[in-house]
Image (cartoon, rainbow, N blue to C red):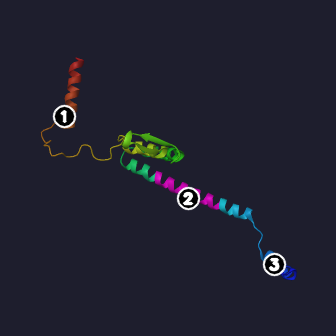
Amino acid sequence: MTIAELQAQVAALTAENAALKANAKPADFAEREANLAAREAAIAEAEKRAARATIEARVDAAIQAGRLLPAQRKHAVDFAAMLTDGEAVVDFGEGDKAMKVSQRDAYLRQIETGPRVVEYGELSGNDGRDTSNLPSLSEIQAGLLAQVAGAAK
């Protein structure tokens, strides 16, 4: 290539570069960062709401099963929501039976498998026995009053 050809090529490239600079949009990284931060906050809030809904469902199921009093619902939900989910784990068992669960899941499992504190069903239902020969409550009460009066003499 000759010097004239090289100079023409440099002039063409310079003109192309100037045209590209004129059409180029300035990079606005601050706006992009703000958009990303807003998206991350929205995703985190949606995940928090979904986790709370899951916690509420599990606590409500425990209340329906009689394992938790309805008055304890708010405390149980708030406490479970405060616990970490996935970062810190609790180990249960040994060897190949070992389970690793999050603090939140361990707390909710404890509630779900705990003893019943409320029995919602009828406890003195008809079990098929004949109760016609049993004394009435008023007869039992009269007998007890007679015993007390006899002991007081």
Q: Residues within 10 Å of mark 3 (few under 14, many from 20)?
A: few
**Amino acid type of disc 2?**
Ala
- Pinpoint residue 54: horizontal percent, then vertical percent: 46, 54
Q: Return the residue at label 3.
A: 13
Residue 24, image quadrant: bottom right
Instruction: For mark 3, give the secondary structure.
Output: helix
Q: Locate the C terminus by quadrant.
A: top left
Residue 68 shown in magenta: no
Picture layout, residue 124 above or below residue 51: above
Q: Of all residues shown, which one is farthest toward the front?
A: 1
Instruction: For mark 2, give the secondary structure.
Output: helix
**Amino acid type of disc 1?**
Glu
Residue at the spot 80% in from the left edge and 74% down from the top edge: 21
Picture layout, residue 71 above or below residue 24: above
Instruction: For mark 1, give the secondary structure.
Output: helix
**Amino acid type of disc 3?**
Leu
Q: In the image, is 23 to the left or to the right of 122? A: right
Sequence-first tag of 2 and 3: 3
Q: In the image, is 28 to the left or to the right of 63? A: right
Label annotation for residue 46: 2
Residues in magenta? 38-55
| Mark 2 and mark 1: Cα distance apart in space | 65 Å
Residue at the spot 39% in from the left edge and 51% down from the top edge: 61
Q: Are marks 1 and 3 in contact (CB under 8 Å)?
A: no
Residue 43 shown in magenta: yes
Tell me the chief SS of the magenta region.
Answer: helix
Label annotation for residue 43: none
Sequence-first tag of 2 and 1: 2
- Pinpoint residue 25: horizontal percent, then vertical percent: 76, 72
Label annotation for residue 139: 1
